[in-house]
Image (cartoon, helix red, strand yellow):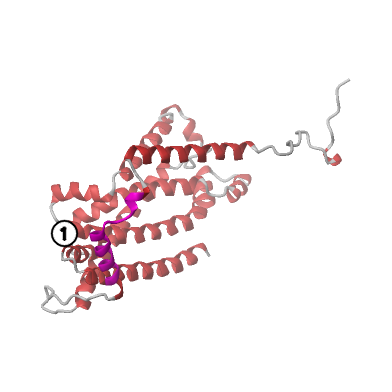
Amino acid sequence: MTPRTPSPGTGKSAHPAPLPGSRPPLLEQRGRTLVLLALCGLAGALFLGLSPAQLLPSPGRLTLAREFLAGALQPSFPTAPTDSGSSGFLSILLAGLGRTISFAAAATGLSVLCAVPLGLCASRSLGRGASWTARPQHQFLPALRSALRLGLAAMRSVHELLWAVLFLAALGLSDLAAVIAIAIPYTGTLAKVFAEFLDEAPPASGESLRAIGASPASLFLVGRLPRALPDMAAYAFYRFECAIRSAAILGFFGYPTLGYHLKNAFDALDYGEVWAWLYALLALVLLLEAWSSALRRRFVA
């Protein structure tokens, strides 16, 4: 006589209830991971010889830190003449802002143009369920997708500053070198994130289209891609904000962006002017954040 399993209506589960005081396996795994990370951090600190005493600055450095922080309360505005013959902080600021935004916009636009097709090709949802993917001549597609993802990882693994050093040596101090230096790692990052957005898009609408006999291409273009587009657009705006900071940093290589004037002020130990340029960069980032947030809300809506 076979034993009877409890019916769903009895309120009894087929799995035994956890014992009092026992921890779920997921929590145990997370606890072990946190302990492992803590041990790795401790080992790294011991290897580098770090100690809390190193956080205490010397008297000379403490005085320098006070002077730097005092400049935040008394920013000074430069009055050096510009190429057009005019002088004043506003004209210098507008020239630096214009070059910074131009580099960021050009690099982000180029990155998006390259990342959209690369992200589509790297997405595992492209061609999912299509009959042509099962043909013998298309059996190499998974290997090509893996190679593409590896290439995207190589593109984003090198920081834009290192790309800038490379292209400065090859192309000189040109605008093209600055744009390409920012665009290469941003393309790798955008393509990877675009592919993940496509793979993780909710398949609910696609299932309803499949039920009425839609083709795999229609499932992707109508059911999955529109679901991922708002997230893709929002992330592209975020990368544009990051490109603003990257373009400003390129000023340390000699490009006339905000970073160029910031570096000159640092070299002259004029901390009041340093804070003036930092405030200008902060205001630019905050304005772009407000603008991109409004655009993201419109896309999501």
Q: How would you rate the neighbour count of disc 1 (Cα within 10 Å): few for under 14, some for 14-19, many for 20 or more?
A: few
User: From the viewer's perspective, is residue 102 above or below residue 209?
Assistant: below
Q: Residue lying at the far top in this picture: please name it.
A: 1
Residue 89, picture quadrant:
bottom left
Q: Is residue 15 left or right of residue 111?
A: right
Where residue 5 sits: x, y (%)?
83, 30
Q: Is residue 54 magenta?
A: yes
Relative depth, front residue between 209 and 48: 48
**Magenta-tinted stretch:** 53-71
Q: According to the image, label 1 marks what residue?
A: 254
Mark 1: amino acid: Gly
Residue 16, picture quadrant:
top right
Relative depth, front residue between 263 and 107: 263
Q: Is residue 47 left or right of residue 85?
A: right
Where residue 123 sits: x, y (%)?
45, 42
| Residue in the picture at 26% in, 56% down | 58
Majority SS type along the magenta span: helix
Is residue 22 visible in this depiction of the protein? yes
Q: Is residue 170 magenta?
A: no
Where residue 45 sits: x, y (%)?
37, 41
Q: Is residue 297 left or right of residue 119?
A: right
| Residue in the picture at 41% in, 28% down | 137
User: From the viewer's perspective, is residue 71 above or below residue 260?
Assistant: below
| Residue in the picture at 78% in, 33% down | 14
| Residue in the picture at 57% in, 47% down | 203
User: From the viewer's perspective, is residue 88 above or below residue 258?
Assistant: below
Q: Is residue 48 left or right of residue 81?
A: right
Secondary structure under the numbered disc 1 in the rendered image:
loop
Relative depth, front residue between 40 and 258: 40
